[in-house]
Amino acid sequence: MEEKQSVWKEFQEHLMTGISYMIPVIVPAGIIMGIGIMIGQFIGVDANSAKLLTSSDPFLKFVGWITQVAGAGMMGLMFPVFAAFVSYSICDKPGLAPGFIGGYLAKEMGSGFLGAIAIGIFAGYAVKFLNEHIKFSRTFRPVKNLFLIPVGGTILAVLASYFVIGPIGNILISAITAFIKMIGEFGAVALGAVISASMAFDLGGPINKTALAMSMQLNTDAGVNAWVPAMIGAVIPAIGVGLATIIDKAVFKRAVFTDQMKTDGFACFLLGFMGISEGCIPFAIKDPLFMVPLNVIASGIGGAIAVALGTSAQTGVPAAIWGWPLAHNPLGWVLAVLVGSLIVCAGTLYRAKTLSKQ
Amino acid sequence: MKKIVAICACPMGIAHTYMAADAIEEAANELGYQVKVETQGASGIEDKLSPKDIKEADLIMIASAVKISQSNRLEGYEDKIVKVELKQAINNSLNIIKEHI
């Protein structure tokens, strides 16, 4: 009884599969690079300077190596892994190899995250097409599965990268970069606000994941400060709501939330600091017409503050509290989360009665 | 006794997967059905459905926003599979099960 899915739904499922396999790659990559850069800042060198790699000081060499070779290398894996699993989502195992090479080429040719999306989709459908249209008898099936499909699919992916996706991707990315330059500083702040607000809108749902993908793309390909606002939007609702359930007694002189909500809220608060926004969902569901706009506005303000204060980070630096010091100007991160969370907290306390209704 | 099995997965594999799993288990228990839910979260597959589970099941619910792993296990049982969004499973498992069983 498979229910019919719309094309957009299907497309979304492929992208989400790619993202879900990519996240475990970019998180450690972002942390490793962030640690290298942080050590560099401490000892007063630029960890991304090519000179470090040939330095005679073993420690400096290590700092350079861990940032530029290990960290950046792992970060570069995000494109192949993403494209491969988008393709895998479409046509299963035979899609992996063409997806990996396509994603690698997207990185090498500079078409970035957009290129990786395009080639992942292309490779997946190309292999699916080959799989469905090449028909062999059972005896010769190994020829098809071991030779024709992987080689044919890969050749198609390579050709598409060279002639179509690479060039078009480059044009698109130059256009995006030019656009971001054009909108200037105010535009960047507004963009940060929009990304952060979208992250908070559905707390881990499809809009949140779309905003996450966009911020990855902008932060990695176009050099826009888009990752930090996304991470901030992910934590503000959870920390704010959690805080409200913790301090309600101090504010109203009596507990206004039920015991269950206080337990949930405390967990939500802690999870918020670990970069997980989903704990906030039960609260948002109870009073969506108030809580969703509240989360969106507060997170938008938080994102804007972070960008305005120049807090930026490598793609993949986690939203969790241990990711904060890995950013450039971590104080902006703290301030943005603080202000945003306090707004959410105040709003939640204001609606405490509605929220604690059974 | 009717048996329901389910597979849940979401992109991050942290929250929605398990919320949906809880909701399905709760709904099945309420209806007095036997239930087993496999979760494909950030830590990999947990409570994996065996071929026997899949064969015996009266209803196979898939609540996922991503491609589920090892979907070849389900080949041949398409007629008892129902695919839903995570959100539907979290909010509405009871009705989904009632409707399909």
Image (cartoon, helix red, strand yellow):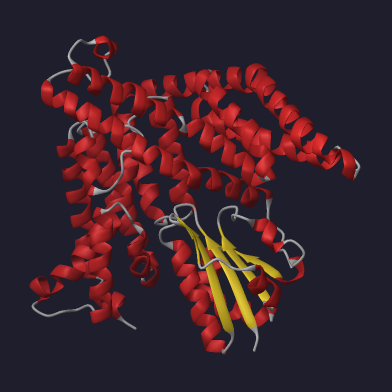
Please identify the quarter of the rendering in which residue A148 is found: top right
What residue do we see at 42% from left, 55% from top?
Answer: A204
Which residue is depicted at the point 16% across and 44% down?
A335
Residue visible at 48% across and 18% down in the picture: A174
Quarter of the N terminus of chain B within the rendering:
bottom right
Left or right: where B32 falls relative to A323: right
Looking at this view, is B42 or A140 the one in front?
A140
- Number of numbered markers: 0
The answer to whether residue A189 shows anywhere in this view is no
Residue B49 lies, in percent from the top left, at 59, 68
Residue A142: percent from left, percent from top: 80, 38
Q: In this orientation, which residue lies closer to the viewer: A320 or A209? A: A320
Task: Tell me the quadrant of the picture where the C terminus of chain B can be found.
Answer: bottom right
Q: Say above or below: B91 vs A155.
A: below
Q: Residue furthest front?
A: A139
In this rendered view, identify the residue nearer to me: B89 or B2: B2
Whether residue A306 sits left or right of residue B67 in the image: it is left
Q: Residue furthest right?
A: A137
State left or right for residue A185 relative to residue B87.
Answer: left
Relative vertical location of residue B45 with respect to residue A55 in this rendering, above or below = below
x then y, percent, for residue A42: 12, 26
Answer above or below: position of A157 versus A206.
above
Query: Which residue shows up at 22% across the image and 36% down it?
Result: A326
Residue A164 seen: yes
